[in-house]
Image (spheres, grey):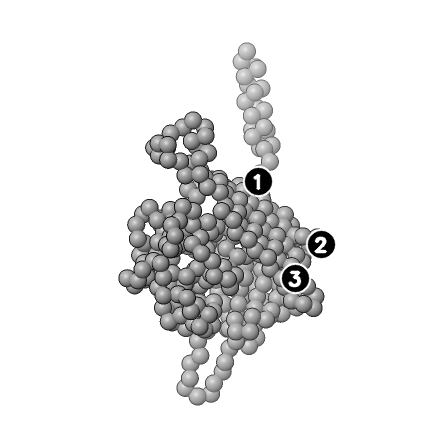
Amino acid sequence: MKPLLGLLFLLLPILVNGQPAGPKHQTVKGTVTDRITHMPLPGVTVQMNDKGAVTDAQGYFRLVEIPAGRHTLQLSLMGYESVTLPNIEVNAGRETVLELSLTERVVNLKDHVVKGRGKGEAINPLAVVSARQLNMEEGMRYAGSRNDPSRMAQNFAGVVGGNDASNDIVVRGNSPNGVLYRMEGIDIPNPNHFSTLGASGGPVTILNPNTLRSSDFMTGAFPAPYGNALAGAFDLRMRNGNKDKYEFLAEVGFNGFEAGAEGPIGKPGKASFLADYRYSTVAVIQSLGLSVGTGVTVPYYRDLNLKVHLPTKNAGAFNLFAMGA
């Protein structure tokens, strides 16, 4: 018996060391554009750790074999202000896709100082005051945000929530009904489940931060395109799907059971799609026979966010997006 136990202990380290390790590296890619003209910038030097790349004619760069974790990204190009972006998160489960911009460097021989736009300033160049850029990855770190863009915005100065049961936004004491929501340049009604007529908030949002990119939140002095806003304006934009390879997402959270997919359409590197579906977490738990304390009042809801990006050679790019709930 003792020789048999000794043999098992000798084989144990071999079995443990033989377990395959999971992926620890991932790809970081994206595009770099001019902040004013929004045109792609070729020749930009992109560095992260000991990895480096140079953007192509379309402003596209790709860094491979980046270790999972948080890293600092540096951008530099002659004639433009150098940019250092700390705490870029690299997730081993999916590629990191970035949309970056550089500000042209202006040299004046007189006593004038020219400063580029800093972190958090609005994307819309017409919004020069009372505007803030909301980065979704950064916003999900805010306490109590529940992956809800409206609750993320409540962390800004002069903005509070109406109550914990709803994501109404009170901007500088104005009515939440005066908040305008806009998606990809189109005004949209109340983007929440179980909303009431004439209101702008609700208990659960339809908006999904996994499908959104950096967006503008304005609290006053609105540019002309936001003429219907009285209290605040939320200019939301959806990101493009991964144009190089297929990726899938499965997630469980406060807002629901979630499943997403993205990838190229046709030849990789060109057109792409992005789709994300959610279903009520409480409804799933209730269907399993477990009580969540809501009695007979069970919030059943589902929502779908979809975007198709179709670039063309001579006619620009076409974007189709849809939101259903």
Write the residue at 60% across / 36% down.
Answer: 20
Query: Mark 1 vs mark 2: which is more N-terminal?
Result: 1
- Nearer the observer, 7 or 256: 256
- Name the residue carrying label 1: 22
Write the residue at 37% across / 54% down.
Answer: 199
Question: Residue 296's spot in the image, x, y percent?
Answer: 37, 32
**Residue 210, above or below 177:** above
Crowding near the residue tagged with mark 3, few <14, some 14–19, many ≥20 C-alpha atoms within 10 Å: some
Question: Residue 112's spot in the image, x, y percent?
Answer: 42, 84
- Name the residue carrying label 2: 267
Residue type for callout 1: Gly
Crowding near the residue tagged with mark 2, few <14, some 14–19, many ≥20 C-alpha atoms within 10 Å: few
User: At numbered mark 3, what does the secondary structure look like: helix, strand or loop?
Assistant: strand
**Residue 217, above or below 152:** below
Would residue 69 appear left or right of 27 to someone viewing this image? Answer: left
Tell me, yes or no, if residue 146 can be seen here.
Answer: no
Cβ–Cβ below 8 Å for labels 1 and 2?
no
Residue type for callout 2: Lys
Crowding near the residue tagged with mark 1, few <14, some 14–19, many ≥20 C-alpha atoms within 10 Å: few
- Name the residue carrying label 3: 311
- Nearer the observer, 18 or 311: 311
- Nearer the observer, 222 or 296: 296
Q: Quadrant of the N terminus?
A: top right
**Residue 7, above or below 224:** above
Cβ–Cβ below 8 Å for labels 2 and 3?
no
Residue that protrudes farthest toward the bottom in the picture? 110
User: At numbered mark 1, what does the secondary structure look like: helix, strand or loop?
Assistant: loop
Question: Residue 194's spot in the image, x, y percent?
Answer: 40, 46
